[in-house]
Image (spheres, coloured by chain):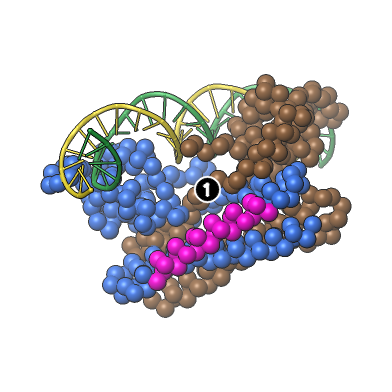
Chain colours: A brown, B blue, C yellow, D green
Amino acid sequence: MPKTNKTKYVILGLLSDEPMSGYDIKERMKISVSHFWNLSYGQIYPTLRHMEKDGWVSKKDIINEGKPNSKVYYLSEKGKHRLREWLKQPIEEENHRYEILLKLYFGNLIPNEYNIEHIQQMRKQYQENIDLFTDFERQLRKVLHLSENHIYILMTILFGIRINEAQIRWCDEVMNILKSM
Amino acid sequence: MPKTNKTKYVILGLLSDEPMSGYDIKERMKISVSHFWNLSYGQIYPTLRHMEKDGWVSKKDIINEGKPNSKVYYLSEKGKHRLREWLKQPIEEENHRYEILLKLYFGNLIPNEYNIEHIQQMRKQYQENIDLFTDFERQLRKVLHLSENHIYILMTILFGIRINEAQIRWCDEVMNILKSM
DNA sequence: GTTGACATGTAAAAAGTTACATGATTGT
DNA sequence: ACAATCATGTAACTTTTTACATGTCAAC
């Protein structure tokens, strides 16, 4: 069975919080779902047009003062219904690609110093991720009661922290092996 | 900067172990790199042809007894050199998509029982992954000394175990939150 | 005047998946 | 006869990325 395209649902989900333009959606994504889902303008604008045609969203031309005009999209009842139905469906299997694992798998073909360098690079990256997520967590915990969706956002941040912690431990584990070779 | 296409390197890496046909490569992938990198026939066959044209691999027509004939590809010196050069390059940033996080992020839009179901589904999946990887780890440790690339394979399996363990802990953490709502 | 944020969009290319076609051989 | 495995391949499609074009407005 072909995998369902989730682009529509990402956009609908973001619009469920408030009406936005394509540009807003892209900007909002940066500070919300970008660490586990990202879309390019090449996906956002055509999908918005397509969903408007299908009645999942409606468009309003907005004349901004001090800013260029924009097209603001509103989630319709139909769109909200479709989003909810999708949210209830089971999670489809996904496979993630890890360049670090690919390189390490063939690690015997190059001098070990390169493998060590790769692990150091990744460890640094993972730590930066944790720092960012931890900061976000702290901010969020302060306002956890202000909105009922904050707790759900927190759960996704916790995921980011947990797997990056695990990845750091793995780096240390692997580094021990590599250095003792 | 555009991301480098790694399809070539996956194939070259597998061929560095032994010459194989397109079919063999796909089969071998299943028991080696598939948990962090997968290719379809639609990628394998055209890429093999392309790499042969570029002299990265060479082809030999093999007449099999008791099996259909096949085209076996050999890693060339040039191909091996290109593979090694790539293996030495730093890891590029990658972003992974997590449907579970996308659904959980918008979890306030549906009854909580669905979110709980999603977490249960994922926890089960993660546990199955661990069981598989752990079994593989056990097998591998028995023959760790027989080949110098086994230790690198082990490292990739350890990665799989570590992140799935972390994901299970996250499931339990999140489940506590969800059940107390 | 030029930089930077705001804003919309598309065309082309690249990458990847899916579905299909074809056929050999082995075992039941 | 039929199913399973082995084997090669491609065409169509979908998805995603990248690069480009266009322009507004505010601030320096």
Q: Which residue is mark 1?
A: A93
Looking at the rendering, which quadrant does residue A181 occupy? Answer: bottom left
Secondary structure character of the magenta stretch overall: helix
Q: Nearer the viewer, residue A107 or B167?
A: B167
Left or right? Give the position of A170 relative to A108. Answer: right
- Residue type for callout 1: Glu
In this rendering, is residue B113 above or below A43? below
Across and down, in percent, residue A140 comes to 79, 57
Chain at tag 1: A
Residue B141 shows in this picture: yes
Name the residue located 47 percent from the left edge and 65 percent from the top edge.
Answer: B131
Q: Nearer the viewer, residue C25 or A43?
A: C25
Left or right? Give the position of B131 relative to B140. Answer: right
Within 10 Å of the Cα at label 1, are there few (<14), some (14-19), or many (20+) other Cα atoms?
A: few
In this rendering, is residue B163 above or below B50? below
Q: Which residues are magenta?
A: B116-138
- Magenta stretch: residue B128 in it? yes
Q: Nearer the viewer, residue B33 or B4?
A: B33
Residue extending farthest to the bottom is A180
- Magenta stretch: residue A62 in it? no
